[in-house]
Image (cartoon, rainbow, N blue to C red):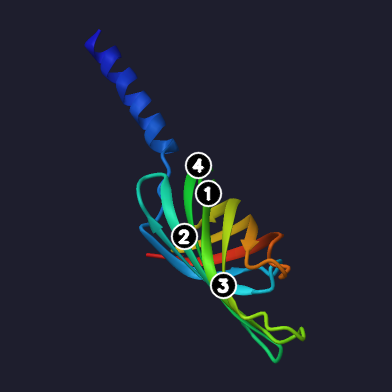
Amino acid sequence: MKKVFFTAILLVGVTFASQAQTISKHAIGLRFGGGNGYGAEVSYQHALGDNNRLELDLGWRNDDDFDSYKLAALYQWVWNIEGGFNWYAGVGGGVGSISDNRFERNNDGAFVFAAGDIGIEYNFDIPLLISLDFRPEIGFYGDEYPLNSFSPDIALGIRYQF
């Protein structure tokens, strides 16, 4: 009876261990989007536990008529699908600054935004993480500026894990 009980406990433990996910302590790379005009963002992820992490993304845009940067911070929950595939969801927000010379009136200043995040990722056997996510954002700037709106963003992320 002891052998059967021990074997059952061992099988249950192996089953849970094989389904347990591991997210890396740190990951840094690029998030290639563009739905909100920032293009590629520098992205950093820091594990806060076995299935949650903090993601920080810094994006900037600099051209003749428009200079801007934004910093997004998202708290994410991560769930294992199978093997190296995970899916994740998160909430957060951020801050930024804008200098826009396209209009006759002055549109310079700071802004804040709220964001959500949902995506899927693959964790390779090498220290490479690739992801595809959707991040809707709602920005708040001023009474007359078009940032007071919904801004969806779909992005491909490539990160080095360490």
Q: Earlier in the sequence, mark 1 or mark 2?
A: 2
Q: For the residues labelled 1 and 2, say whether their Cβ atoms are less than 8 Å apart.
A: yes
Disc 2 marks a residue whose amino acid type is Glu
Q: Which residue is mark 4?
A: 80
Disc 4 marks a residue whose amino acid type is Asn
Q: Which residue is mark 3?
A: 41
Label 3: few (<14), some (14–19) or many (≥20) C-alpha neighbours in 10 Å: many
Query: What residue do we see at 62% from left, 81% from top?
Result: 108
Q: Which residue is mark 1?
A: 90
For the residues labelled 3 and 4, the Cα–Cα distance comes to 25 Å
Disc 1 marks a residue whose amino acid type is Gly
Q: Earlier in the sequence, mark 3 or mark 4?
A: 3
Snapshot quadrant of residue 45:
bottom left
For the residues labelled 1 and 2, the Cα–Cα distance comes to 9 Å
Q: Can you say whether 148 is above or below 116 in the image?
A: below
Snapshot quadrant of residue 104:
bottom right
For the residues labelled 4 and 2, the Cα–Cα distance comes to 18 Å
For numbered disc 3, what is the local secondary structure? strand
Picture coordinates of residue 81, whole percent (x, y): 55, 40
For the residues labelled 2 and 3, the Cα–Cα distance comes to 12 Å
For the residues labelled 1 and 3, the Cα–Cα distance comes to 18 Å
For numbered disc 2, what is the local secondary structure? strand
